[in-house]
Amino acid sequence: MNDPAWSSTRGNYYSAIPPHAGMKLAREIATVTYRSGPEWELRFGRRRADPSKPPALCPDFLIETYLDHAGEKWCLEYDANSLLYVSKAMDLFDLGKEHMDMLEGVRASNVHKLDQFGADKPTPKPESGAADLCNLTLPDTPYEEQESTAEIMNENADIKAAAQDNEPPADLVKGMQGLRDIPALVLGVASDILFPAWQQREIAAALRKVGNRKVTHVELGEDRSLFGHDTFLLDLEGVGGELKRFLG
């Protein structure tokens, strides 16, 4: 969004130059998170693309050339605004009861807007201008880093201990009530840093906590997959095999 091609148009760049640089950088950063450090080390390490040439201020290491190519290719095929919405949806994803209730309320309050989108009805005009699209209100005093007090340290220790005991958050347990009688396969990947394996353990524990007796929890360790979040795309046997067994 800091790309001038996006910020100068507030995202309405469709009749102008698209935010190529920002989109490319976003894809490069995202690509790093889709995989895992051990995989990058095995595939690229510190190898340079061309050791015979002196170092330069451009994609020089092999991993840099890979990310540069991936970002360049991707930003020519996808829309930047679509990426922003998908990214925001991921940030807001929450299985807890409080969030699910809030989401249900928002949907109910917007039913009338959805009804306006009929085959014979014109698309409604936005109620606010482009300047109102971002409703972020910054605090008067900037946030300052503070030293961890003993109370905060103890609180964090309690949270960590609860996580190690597989005791899921109460709000998550409440959010799982509707799945009490639904057979569930919860599959985690140890090398996944986007949806960490400990979160999958929490989900499985929460399902069991509400009385679900048909929970299958599988965790693929790094000995099985180093593909990180992309394991679901690349490990056909590890992921596909578990799905096949679950579906019978």
Image (tube, rainbow, N blue to C red):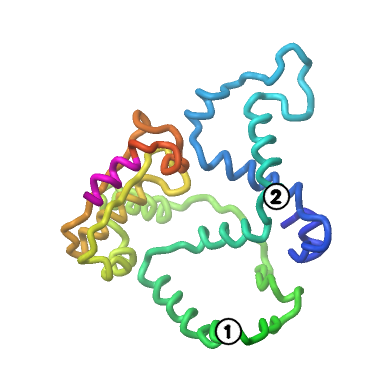
Between residues 211 and 240, which one lies in front from this camera angle? 240
Number of the label disc, if any, that sits on residue 23: 2
Crowd class of label 2 (few under 14; some 14 to 19; many from 20; radius 10 Å): many
What is the x, y in percent for residue 101?
A: 40, 76
In which quarter of the view is residue 204 placed?
A: bottom left
Q: Which residue is mark 1?
A: 118
Task: Describe the element under mark 2 as helix, strand or loop.
Answer: helix
Crowd class of label 1 (few under 14; some 14 to 19; many from 20; radius 10 Å): few
**Residue segment shown in magenta:** 239-248
> What main secondary structure does the magenta stretch of the protein show?
helix
What is the x, y in percent for residue 214?
A: 18, 57
Q: Quadrant of the N terminus?
A: bottom right
Q: Is residue 227 left or right of residue 125?
A: left
Q: Nearer the viewer, mark 1 or mark 2?
A: 1
Q: Is residue 205 left or right of residue 188?
A: left
Q: Looking at the image, which residue is at 64% across and 45% down?
A: 27
Give, as a three-letter code, the residue at label 1.
Answer: Gly
How far apart are the two marked residues, 1 and 2, measured between alpha carbons?
33 Å
Between residues 166 and 45, which one lies in front from this camera angle? 45
Number of the label disc, if any, that sits on residue 86: none
Q: Is residue 30 left or right of residue 228?
A: right
Q: Looking at the image, which residue is at 67% across and 56% down?
A: 79
Q: Looking at the image, which residue is at 66% across and 73% down?
A: 135
Task: Describe the element under mark 1 as helix, strand or loop.
Answer: loop
Give, as a three-letter code, the residue at label 2.
Answer: Met
> Is residue 240 in the magenta section?
yes
Q: Is residue 81 above or below residue 195?
A: below
